[in-house]
Amino acid sequence: MPKKSQIIKSKKKPKFSTRIVRRCFRCGRKRGFMRKFGLCRICFREMANQGLIPGVRKSSW
């Protein structure tokens, strides 16, 4: 888990556009981030399994 200072720093507008750090809004994780949902892969999976994300369900074939 990131420190509060890291989360606050990532929300600030960076000097250059390539320095943007996208973080999960739920836990603050920066790796494994899905832009479309604004979540990391772990939080996405938890919420999808609980049915909290509309239009997303576990695939099976």
Image (spheres, rainbow, N blue to C red):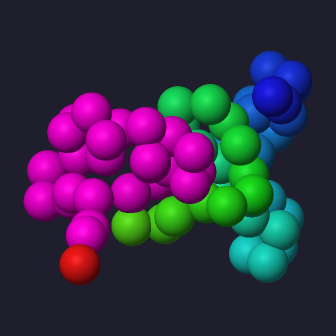
**46 over 17 or under it: above or below:** above
- Across and down, in percent, residue 32 comes to 67, 61
How many badges with numbers are in the image?
0
Vertical relation: 30 (above or below) 50: below
Image spot of residue 42 (x, y percent):
57, 45
Could you tell me which residue is drawn at 79 percent across and 78 percent down? 18
| Residue stretch in magenta | 37-60
Residue lying at the far front in this picture: please name it.
61
Q: Quadrant of residue 5?
A: top right
Q: Name above or below for residue 1 compared with residue 9.
A: above
List x then y, in percent, for residue 52. 22, 36
**On the rendered image, what quadrant is the N terminus found in?**
top right
Q: Is residue 24 left or right of residue 3?
A: left
User: In the picture, residue 19 is in which quadrant?
Assistant: bottom right
- Can the viewer see residue 30? yes
Q: Is residue 49 left or right of residue 28?
A: left
Viewer-proximal residue among 41 and 6: 41
Residue drawn at point x = 38 percent, y = 57 percent: 37
- Most distant residue in the top direction: 4
In this view, the residue in front, 13 or 36, is 36
User: Along the horizontal axis of the image, is 39 left or right of 15?
Assistant: left
Residue 1 is covered by the magenta coloring: no
Quadrant containing the C terminus is bottom left
Q: Residue at x 71, y 43 (%)?
A: 29
